[in-house]
């Protein structure tokens, strides 16, 4: 009898192990591919491990086609003796379940002539269906969503960026976009939106700013990538938020505490000269992910080669339900508990911190400290993460 039970347990274990292996095999992997030649570089993603080979082939073909990868590889050979080189890079999203793939590909440098320029391309696929993700797949009413976004761009984004653009026309909405758990990023033609550092501009819109237009049913794309988790603060976030902050970063903001400041400036470019605040410098970067986000660093030197990110401040954020302009102090205290410290910020202190007067709550999670600052009405306005 004991032998039969043992044999049955072994069979069940083998079946369970095989099921896990089969599930793991169906989750795709992003492989970095490319070539470097005489100062030029072309890198692009290549998916492997999809359960459906036809979907895998379609996605990889779209990457090659939309990113014009073969043309870029050929272009490198023509630039071997040219002082202006070509760099092709990418950033990708692949959710943990392998359901959605979203990728931006940037061609920078002597793309078509010896004159430096930039071109964006994007590839968005629902890997469950093998279909390319259209703009309309994200919204309950695509026309209403487009109208809302264009109004948002004209009324809120354009005035904010107008002083920092070499050229700019944010509407109509560009066809090139990518998705992340926290927002929608739009990629512009350099002739329509060019920054002062001659980069093709991007704008990131948070899902909380599009909340009423989103398709968030169980099978929808945005649900698959976790967008609903970031636009509603629930009781489960008392555990989720501390865990998510272990990396020393906010989801959707591509910078982390301890990262070299010069590395980020080289990649994203300074939007304005650094501003001083009580205790250091506030650094604003050009990339759309950093709009109304500042990196906090020391005030000891004029150069950045020895500086690191000592903190991150976000006045636009949706991070596991901590939504600026929306979440209230009463609700985050209900979820996160009473803060370790509360500071009343008067006008003089607010000026030194470049924030509005109000109330700051402080929470410590591991080695990081989270500061949630509410205005006089008790609404979240600024979020700080420091070590």
Image (cartoon, rainbow, N blue to C red):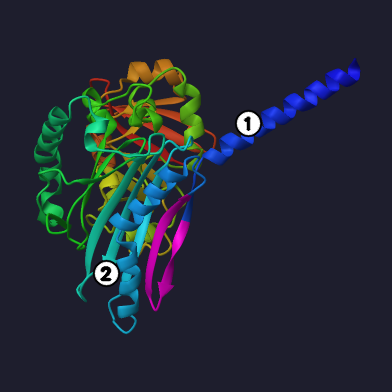
Task: Name the residue nearer the viewer: 104 or 15.
Answer: 15
Res 169 seen here? yes
Residue under label 1, please give it: 19
Which SS does the magenta portion mostly show? Answer: strand
Q: Secondary structure at mark 1?
A: helix
Q: Quadrant of the N terminus?
A: top right
Q: Is residue 256 left or right of residue 199?
A: right
Give the x, y percent position of residue 188.
19, 52
Q: Farthest residue toward the front? A: 54
When the figure is inspected, residue 359 is found, relative to residue 134, above or below; the finding is above
Q: Is residue 240 left or right of residue 350?
A: right
Q: Secondary structure at mark 2?
A: strand
Give the x, y percent position of residue 245.
47, 36
Residue in view at x 37 percent, y 48 percent: 58
Residue under label 2, please give it: 109
Front label number (2 vs 1) = 1
Residue 45 in the magenta stretch? The answer is yes
Residue in view at x 23 percent, y 62 percent: 118
User: Which quarter of the picture shows residue 206?
Assistant: top left
Q: Which residues are magenta?
A: 32-47
Task: Name the residue nearer the viewer: 265 or 106.
Answer: 106
Tell me whether circle 2 and circle 1 mark residues in contact (CB < 8 Å): no
Task: Name the residue nearer the viewer: 185 or 97.
Answer: 97
Give the x, y percent position of residue 297.
38, 51
| Disc 2 from disc 1: Cα separation | 47 Å
Q: Is residue 243 left or right of residue 165?
A: right
Crowdedness near tag 1: few (<14), some (14–19) or many (≥20) residues, C-alpha within 10 Å: few
Res 357 seen here? no
Mark 2 or 1, nearer chain start:
1
When the figure is inspected, residue 145 is found, relative to residue 193, above or below; the finding is above
Residue 83 in the magenta stretch? The answer is no
When the figure is inspected, residue 274 is found, relative to residue 290, above or below; the finding is below
């Amino acid at each position: 009898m004991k032998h039969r039970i043992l044999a049955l347990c072994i069979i069940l274990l083998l079946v369970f192990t095989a099921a896990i292996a089969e599930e793991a095999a169906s989750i795709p992997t992003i492989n970095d591919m490319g070539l470097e030649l005489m100062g030029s570089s072309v890198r692009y993603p290549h998916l492997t491990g999809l359960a459906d080979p036809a979907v895998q082939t379609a996605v990889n073909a779209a990457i090659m086609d939309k990113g014009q990868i073969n043309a870029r590889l050929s272009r490198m050979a023509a630039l071997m003796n040219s002082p202006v080189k070509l760099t092709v890079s990418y950033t990708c999203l692949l959710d943990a379940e392998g359901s959605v793939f979203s990728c931006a590909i940037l061609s920078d440098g002597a793309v078509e002539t010896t004159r430096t320029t930039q071109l964006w391309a994007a590839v968005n696929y629902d890997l469950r269906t093998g279909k390319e993700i259209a703009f309309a797949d994200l919204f309950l009413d695509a026309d209403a969503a487009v109208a809302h976004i264009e109004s948002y761009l004209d009324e809120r984004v354009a005035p904010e960026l107008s002083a920092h653009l070499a050229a700019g026309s944010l509407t109509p909405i560009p066809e090139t976009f990518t998705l992340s758990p926290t927002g929608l990023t739009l990629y512009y033609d350099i002739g329509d939106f060019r920054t002062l550092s001659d980069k093709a501009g991007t704008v990131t819109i948070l899902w909380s700013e599009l909340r009423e237009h989103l398709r968030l049913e169980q099978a929808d794309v945005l649900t698959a990538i976790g967008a609903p988790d970031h636009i509603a603060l629930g009781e489960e976030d008392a555990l989720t938020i501390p865990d998510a902050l272990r990396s020393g970063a906010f989801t959707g903001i591509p910078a982390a505490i301890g990262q070299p400041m010069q590395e980020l400036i080289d990649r994203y470019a300074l939007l304005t000269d650094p501003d001083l605040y009580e205790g250091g410098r506030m650094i604003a970067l050009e990339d759309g992910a950093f709009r109304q986000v500042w990196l906090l660093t020391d005030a000891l030197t004029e150069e950045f080669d020895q500086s690191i990110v000592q903190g991150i401040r976000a006045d636009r954020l949706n991070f596991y339900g901590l939504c600026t302009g929306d979440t209230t102090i009463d609700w985050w205290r209900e979820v996160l508990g009473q803060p370790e410290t509360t500071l009343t910020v008067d006008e003089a202190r607010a000026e030194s911190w470049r924030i509005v007067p109000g109330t700051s709550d402080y929470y410590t999670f591991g080695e990081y400290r989270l500061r949630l600052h509410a205005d006089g009405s008790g609404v979240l306005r600024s979020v700080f993460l420091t070590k």
